[in-house]
Image (cartoon, rainbow, N blue to C red):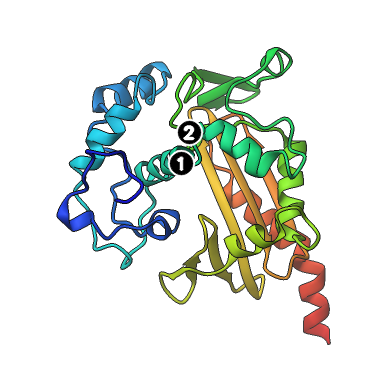
Amino acid sequence: QELLPQGVELPEAARGVTLRHLTTHTSGFPRLAANQSKLRGLGMMIFGGDPYAGYTEADLMDAVRAVKLQSKPGTKSCYSNFGMTLLGQLLATKAGSSYEALAKQEVCLPLSMHDTTVTFNRTQACRVAQGYRALWRCGPLVLTLRSDPWFEGNNLGGAGALRSTAIDMLKYLQANMHPDGQPLEHALVESHRELFRENERMAFGMNWVRTQSERLQQTMIWHNGGTGGFRSFIGFTADSRFGVLVLSNSSEGVDDLAIELLRDLAKPLLQRRRTE
């Protein structure tokens, strides 16, 4: 509430929501804001459009004023793009910046991720992969439906507006796996720390999911992403020995593939442990 613009009041039930609640998805905010058009979402599914097109800061603040929590803050995790949009906007406003400029200044530039952005420059625009919202395979034939990019011309980028490359994301993976000596060492370590425990197998850091894996015999720290025609997964073992990144330009999920890759990487070590 302290960070919201003057005149924007949270409902009584939401007055206790904190930034910690937002980053751990325990705010009780629904997945999407109530004033995000269902017709727009349907149009996105049918025609491949951008469900965030035309959604403004004023729309976001209207949704904040009327938010109906799904649970008491700090008691239950429920992933919320609404909460992520609000978190990104609050941080950017506090810094007197846009979300894109803030992310570049505080994260991308210190980690030498010079190809990670929201708005493409001329050289980046010609290298953009086409996203596909649907795929059908018939023998050697693959039929596809294209998707428009999401968040174009939208300053509310906290829910997934950043676009990147495999090279930049491998830099990010490396920095998180081995934060010692990194420009953002303290912030990276803090972001991994458990802030909310959902159950004995799942917990949350600062937007990182912490899953106890029996097959890996340790905690896996990960996050995935999905926008129109794209999917992503980045994850690593808590001992920082193994990590994986998967980027895809289709709407087919990549989580299972990424986790299997991580398990395959760790398999020789696990076999040695069993023989010992």
Q: Is residue 32 left or right of residue 14?
A: right
**Point 59% across, 44% down: residue:** 254
Q: Is residue 207 above or below residue 169?
A: below
Q: Secondary structure at mark 2?
A: loop
The residue nearer to you, when weighing 233 against 101, is 101
> Which label's residue is closer to the chain start, 2 or 1?
1
* Crowding at mark 1 (Cα within 10 Å: few <14, some 14-19, many 20+): many
Q: Is residue 17 visible?
A: yes
The residue nearer to you, when weighing 87 against 2, is 2
Q: Secondary structure at mark 1?
A: helix
Q: Is residue 34 visible?
A: no
Q: Quadrant of residue 90?
A: top left
Q: Is residue 38 left or right of residue 112?
A: left
Estimate the x, y position of residue 31 in percent, counting from the top left.
33, 45
**Point 23% across, 56% down: residue:** 15
The residue nearer to you, when weighing 180 against 245, is 180
Marks 2 and 1, how far apart at CA = 7 Å
Q: Are marks 2 and 1 in contact (CB under 8 Å)?
A: yes
**Point 54% across, 24% down: residue:** 132
Question: Please, what is the three-letter code of the amino acid marked with disc 2?
Answer: Gly
Q: Residue under circle 1?
A: 88
Estimate the x, y position of residue 166 in percent, counting from the top left.
73, 37
Question: Please, what is the three-letter code of the amino acid marked with disc 1?
Answer: Gly
**Point 27% across, 35% down: residue:** 61
Q: Residue under circle 2?
A: 157
Residue 116 badge: none
Q: Quadrant of residue 47?
A: top left
Estimate the x, y position of residue 109 in percent, counting from the top left.
72, 38
Q: Is residue 134 above or below residue 203?
A: above
Estimate the x, y position of residue 147 in percent, counting from the top left.
49, 20
Q: Quadrant of the C terminus?
A: bottom right
Q: Is residue 79 above or below residue 132?
A: below
